[in-house]
Image (spheres, rainbow, N blue to C red):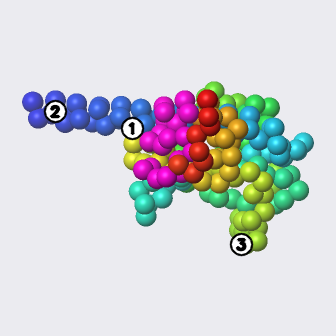
Amino acid sequence: MRNVTIILSLLMFSVFYSQNKCERLKETTESLLNMYVKDTLKTSFKDGDYIIAYIYSNEKFNTIGFLIDTFNKKNDLYKKSTNYRWFKFKNKKLIIFCDLNPTQKCKEYFNKLKSIELLDVDIEIKDQETIDDQLDGEIKPWSVYFNKDYKIINVSGKIIEAEIAAPKEFKMFLKKFSNLKLYQMTENGVIVYPKPHR
């Protein structure tokens, strides 16, 4: 009986831990999307453009990647994954592709995004893309990578430019959700931009 109790306790802890991590991932990605929209509206967002986000498991490096970009309505849209949903976020169209392993994590992740309004969008999504197509739409790409505890350990793309534009907001965000310092692209890496003088 004691062994059964221990096993049940471990199972309950495992479920709770998994749900807690998914909640953390949802909270982090929503915060990133919020900062992305605020930053992009100042510069390159045009009428009819929409946002693409892609979250996926990188088995080679045991990380999770999260990419955000602005996409021109004139360009063709290609599937990053068969798991995707359209949302309305800050009055902008947003499509999120999910390629987490196992695929059940995508369902859990989408179910957590209850604070973002689901949207019906009639935009054709094509099945294949070429190298040239992959280069289209890269208006303002942000890339972040999470470790197994869903802490951000790497950033790339134009996110550093956004940090320079809004250092206080990013400093609070990084302190809460990452192992990085302001203007740091990789965990334990160099600071790529000098801290502003007070």
Indicate whether 105 appears above or below 168: below
Residue closest to the eye, 138 or 165: 165
Q: Which mark is residue 6?
A: 2
Q: Residue furthest top?
A: 115
The residue sitting at 65% across, 47% down in the picture is 159
Residue of label 3:
131
Residue mark closest to the camera, 3 vs 1: 3
Residue of label 1:
18
Magenta range: 171-190
Residue mark closest to the camera, 3 vs 2: 3
Indicate whether 173 appears above or below 187: above
Q: Residue furthest left?
A: 2
Q: Is residue 196 left or right of residue 62?
A: right
Query: Could you tell me the amino acid type at mark 2?
Result: Ile
Please check the rendered image and state whether residue 72 is part of the magenta-colored stretch, yes or no.
no
Q: Is residue 148 left or right of residue 154?
A: left
